[in-house]
Image: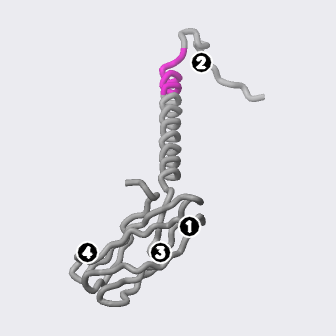
Amino acid sequence: MAATRESPLGGRYGRSADDRADRRLKIIGAVLGAGLLALVGWFGVSYITGQDVSGELIKFKVVSDQAVEAHLEVRKDAGTAGVCTVRTLSEAGGEVGWKDVRFDEPETRVDKVVTVRTTERATALELVRCQPAGSG
């Protein structure tokens, strides 16, 4: 058996200053740890619940001076209708067309090729956003 060293005063005058400081640090650490855990949980829940509809631009193809084809992949909750907005840009960077594409399919993953009409030849197409249908 190993003998433990005790203070020669035997705790006669209460806890030492080191014991009080250690206890205070443990309490502060526990409170900060619990707060950090709650914050990470809150971010996780808000991220998951805020992602009802998400989309990705797979590719696009300029088919004429007045049209661009876009291949979109959308992931959403089953039964949720979604709307994705795409816009086309000219070589100078100006917007030359846009389109809201509605996804009413009951599947959770939908691939769709859509045609966006343009006012002049487009050189780029971008996916602006995807959101549940009916949300502003």
The residue type indicated by label 1 comes to: Glu
Label drawn at residue 7: 2
Q: Is residue 70 left or right of residue 41?
A: left
The quadrant in which the N terminus is found is top right
Q: Nearer the viewer, mark 3 or mark 2?
A: 3
Q: Nearer the viewer, residue 71 or 14?
A: 71
Range covered by the magenta-colored residues? 15-24
Residue at horizontal 44 percent and vertical 81 percent from the top: 59
Q: Nearer the viewer, mark 2 or mark 1?
A: 1
The residue type indicated by label 3 comes to: Leu
Residue bearing mark 3:
72
Marks counted in the figure total 4
Crowd around label 4: few <14 · some 14–19 · many ≥20 (10 Å): some
Residue bearing mark 1:
105
Which secondary structure type mostly characterizes the magenta part of the structure? Answer: helix
Image coordinates of residue 127 in percent, x first then y, are: 39, 71
Q: In this figure, which colouring scheme has been used for the structure?
A: one colour
Image coordinates of residue 8 in percent, x first then y, are: 59, 15
